[in-house]
Amino acid sequence: MKLIDIWSEKNKQTLSFELFPARSEKAAIRLNKTIDVLAALEPDFVSVTFGAGGSTRDGSRQLIEKLKVEKGLEMLAYFAGYGLGPQDITSVLDSYQELGVENLLVVRGDVPHDQDDFQPHPESFQHASDLLAFIEPRYDFCLGAAAYPEGHIEAESKEQDLEFLKLKVDSGAEFIVTNYCYDSKYFFDFLDRARGLGIDVPLLPGVMPIYSEKMMESLAALCGATITDEIKTGLVGLPVGDKDAVLDYGIDFAYKQCVELLGAGVPGVHIYTMDRSKTTRAIVTRLREEGLLQ
């Protein structure tokens, strides 16, 4: 089912998770256990990432097939087009279409950092808006785009970044999934500015729980998310070296953020699971016990 139909026809706030393909045998075993736990939570859909330069093309398709065919889950397939030529793009999208995938999150993608000899195809698209414009007339996917409430780390300004997002919508994006921010005021400010610019498609906020201090700092450095004073103070107050205490703090913090977002009427919450299940299950269980999610 197309995501825009879930939001409009079912008139509900959705629960969704993000997963990424395993890169080792050990990770694959852990991911399979995670899938069993998360599938039992009956999310409205699950997204699967697509590695830079098509590096996880086969792994992404295999994971999508497992989730859709074996688990019966609705899928949102990422597609990162950087470096890929038109034939590669259509090959991937044809395979997704054959699997019955109806929803596609179209992103530019990053330059592969682990492929020193990587050469982008001379006809590859430089921007997500160009990729959307290529896909929209050729396929019947429900197309989505990504956004950064605090601004993309490469953007010259938030205003320019928002103009680029408007171009994505004008090029075919029917919904938007945002990067996470630890202070929801960034999301609400972004929402107001987007609506003011005429971006009227559903804007789904991403939520990134704190899994460890090291991971939190690494991810924030990559995407430009602000680690708030509230979080810094909260983590300092925990017993030194107590990983479980950090995990519990992360669960509480993400739960409260989901409550705030859902209470404000967002289309749903999209949880970045990092291929883990304990934290996500705890958050979802509490939200449902409080009647905040179906």
Image: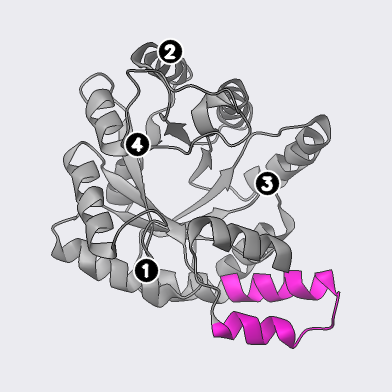
Residue 285 visible at all: no
Label 2 secondary element: helix
Q: Which residue is mark 3?
A: 275
Q: What secondary structure predominates along the stretch shown in magenta?
A: helix
> Left or right: 280 with respect to 154?
right
Q: Which mark is residue 69?
A: none
Residue 69: x and y in percent read 58, 24
Classify mark 2: residues with Cα within 10 Å, few (<14), some (14-19) or many (20+): few
Q: Which residue is mark 1?
A: 187
Label 1 secondary element: helix
Q: Which mark is residue 2?
A: 4
Tag 2 and tag 1, C-beta contact below 8 Å? no
Q: CA distance from mark 2 to mark 1?
A: 35 Å
N-term mark: 2 or 1: 2
Q: Check residue 161 for magenta coloring.
A: no
The correct choice, above or below, for 205 with respect to 168 in the image is below
Q: Which residue is mark 2?
A: 91
> Left or right: 225 with respect to 250?
left
Residue 98 occupies quadrant: top left
Tag 4 and tag 2, C-beta contact below 8 Å? no
